[in-house]
Amino acid sequence: AAEEGFDLEDVEGAIEAAGHGPLPVLAVVGRPNVGKSTLVNRIIGRREAVVEDKPGVTRDRVTYEAEWAGRRFKVVDTGGWEQDVLGIDASVAAQAEYAIEAADAVVFVVDAKVGATDTDEAVVRLLRKAGKPVVLCANKVDGPSGEADAAYLWSLGLGEPYPVSALHGRGTGDMLDQVLEVLPEAPAQTFGTAVGGPRRIALIGRPNVGKSSLLNKVAGEERVVVNELAGTTRDPVDEMIELGGRTWKFVDTAGIRKRVHLQQGADYYASLRTAAAVEKAEVAVVLIDASESISVQDQRIVTMAVEAGRALVLAYNKWDTLDEERRYYLEREIETELGQVAWAPRVNVSARTGRHMEKLVPAIETALEGWETRVPTGRLNAFLGELVAAHPHPVRGGKQPRILFGTQAGTKPPRFVLFASGFIEAGYRRFIERRLREEFGFEGTPIHISVRVRE
Ligand code: GDP
Ligand code: GDP
């Protein structure tokens, strides 16, 4: 490495940074209007105000990556959910419960100017039960005169209230230091620790694509209970199901089971649920209704799984209803709408007739295999050497940036670090990704490629 102009420390640092395992998850919960979104914006360093004043605004993005004091973690923003037909207590409780379930630590935001309300007390009970580490954020303490308000929140029994002004940034540093104190280094659901334990599947998709039907079909019995109220069930949310001679854990099946007809915020609620399921899973099976046009919502769900770095299987359901014409258009739609995940194994199923159910497990196994693939450094560099010789990077400004060497820094999903003599264009990166896939497979897995440029 040294003779190529990188010193060993740089190389090791880059590999370590790129090879990080799954990040721990921090959930920010609390009543509406206490300042959760404002705080999340501050934590993730978003400059512009994205706080929406309109109620019921759909926000599908709920998980963000953040960094504080050199540590990286994910933040789940629950601020987009408005009060709904369930009434405020139930909705706040359900929202908090879902977020807490997926989290490794929680920031509980209370409006210090208002003080603790009954709804706040209800959330405290949930937090106690969940047993996750909690940091109490006493928000809207915009100046020293508000500190006394914060002190009243000792009464919640959650330890020290951190006086914060999410709006102005006051006190957020101290609070985040405390967050890092209690946030575990790695998520509780650390991959691969339980050797031979069941693999974790998230069955996701927009409403009515057939998730509960499929779950019933594969579980072989009617397990799905409809019309349960969100947040009222206490039973385990994961379901063990035997398939293809192996036990699989379908995570977060409560999200499939519960049919809550919310007026406002229903899409957001579904997104939060999906994000929580994806966080807990190793592989996402995204169910798509093949009888209808592929929608933006389908694409968003696929993107969520890809961005979370999970293995991916696409299952096109309701195949029994397709005529020849629809099949023709479906193929065109898949190419245009989901072309970016052409690497994902695909099954055409019918939860109603049971068509191709037996193909689901092999597809999942293929995706997990791709997700865990590790390319030895020698092989990788032999491949990169040939690639660069045969297809050099275009010359830019009289210079030709070159990939000098590379290594796979991690798996689940595969992460590569490439070291280059100059800036590598996006088009060339995509070309390398394509060739990597052709050469080494990686079926069913996103792959990350980061490029380090020699100073
Ligand atoms: P959420 O519903 O909990 O996500 O709350 P928002 O982040 O949307 O904030 C609700 C309102 O409180 C907005 O008008 C914010 O500008 C305001 N707000 C948030 N944080 C603070 C703060 O630290 N001080 C003051 N004075 N207002 C704040
Ligand atoms: P979920 O909201 O994703 O859990 O979807 P459901 O499982 O509740 O299914 C929604 C509707 O689609 C129900 O009326 C199902 O009977 C129907 N459905 C589900 N799978 C299939 C299928 O493979 N073929 C047909 N024709 N209908 C299906």
Image (cartoon, rainbow, N blue to C red):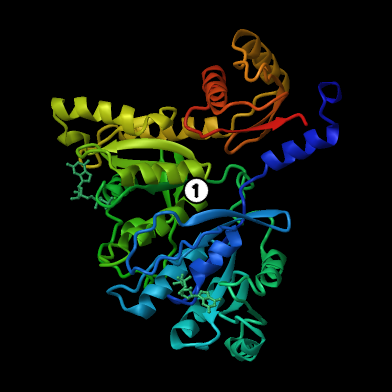
On screen, residue 5 above or below 360: above
Quarter the N terminus occupies: top right
Callout 1 secondary element: loop
The residue that appears at 60% across and 91% down in the rendered structure is: 152
Whole-percent x, y for residue 109 in the image: 54, 76
- Label 1, on which residue? 281
Residue 85 x/y as whole percent: 27, 74
* Quadrant occupied by the C terminus: top right
Q: How dense is the environment of label 1, judged by Cα within 10 Å: few (below 14), some, or many (20 and up)?
A: many
Left/right of residue 251 with respect to residue 355 in the rendered view: right
Quadrant assignment, res 330 = top left
Residue 431 at least partly seen: yes
Q: Residue furthest top?
A: 390
Q: Is residue 72 left or right of residue 47?
A: right
Q: Position of residue 86 (x, y in %)?
A: 30, 75
Q: Position of residue 343 (x, y in %)?
A: 44, 28
Residue placed furthest toward the front: 397
Q: Residue at x 62, y 36 (%)?
A: 411
Viewer-side residue, 391 vs 283: 391
